[in-house]
Image (tube, rainbow, N blue to C red):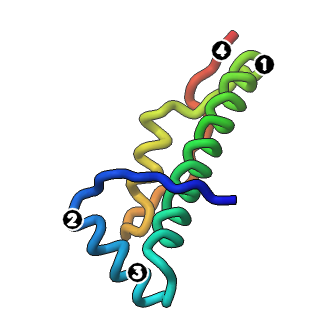
């Protein structure tokens, strides 16, 4: 069963939530709950990926640098989109 929660939010954010709720014929509470769930799910996924990367770092010998990865991601949807980066960091 759901429990009530009280929180203060910015008026603009509340207005956006209300607009979405109206457009989807849902309650503001439902939309806010879905938004919070999506946020928490994304945080959990991120944490799992970080833990997985740390575990892999203990056994893997080749990595793609953060710089190479960011350059690739930043090139997405541009005329100069880069191919996926190859490992450029090597550990003995």
Residue at image location 35% in from the left, 78% down from the top: 18
Is 73 situated left or right of 3 in this image? left
Query: Along the polypeptide, which appears first: circle 2 or circle 1?
Result: 2
Q: Nearer the viewer, residue 56 or 69?
A: 56
Give whichever of discs 3 and 1 has the lower sequence position.
3
Which residue occupies the extreme top position in the image?
Answer: 92
Helix, strand or loop at label 1? It is loop
Which residue is most to the left? 11
Whole-Å distance between the Cαs marked 2 and 1?
A: 49 Å
Examine the rendered structure and indicate whether residue 18 appears above or below residue 78.
Answer: below
Earlier residue among tags 4 and 1? 1
Distance of mark 3 from mark 1, alpha carbons?
A: 46 Å
Badge count: 4
Q: For residue 63, what is the image quadrant?
A: top right
The tag on residue 11 is 2
Tag 3–tag 4 contact (CB < 8 Å) = no
Instruction: Tell me the residue that label 1 is attached to.
Output: 59
Give the distance between the C-alpha atoms of the residues marked 4 and 2, in whole angstroms. 51 Å
**SS category of the residue bearing label 2:** helix
Characterize the local packing of mark 2: few (<14), some (14-19) or many (20 or more) Cα atoms within 10 angstroms: few
On the image, numbered disc 3 is attached to which residue? 20
Give the mark toward the camera: 4 or 1: 1
In the displayed structure, does residue 74 sit left or right of residue 45? left
Q: Kindly report which numbered mark, 2 or 1, lies closer to the viewer in this rendering.
A: 2
Dots 4, 1 in contact, CB < 8 A = no
Determine the residue positioned at 48% across, 79% down.
27
Q: Who is closer to the viewer here, 35 or 49?
A: 35
- Alpha carbon separation for disc pair 3 and 2: 14 Å
Disc 4: which residue: 91
């Amino acid at each position: 069963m759901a429990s009530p929660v009280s929180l203060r939010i910015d008026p603009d954010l509340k207005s956006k939530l209300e607009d979405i709720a109206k457009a989807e014929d849902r309650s503001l509470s439902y939309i806010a709950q879905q938004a919070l769930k999506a946020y928490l799910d994304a945080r959990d996924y991120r944490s799992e990926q970080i833990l997985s990367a740390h575990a892999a770092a203990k056994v893997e010998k080749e990595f793609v640098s953060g710089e190479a990865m960011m350059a690739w991601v930043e090139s997405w949807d541009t005329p100069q989109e880069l191919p996926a980066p190859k490992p450029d960091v090597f550990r003995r």
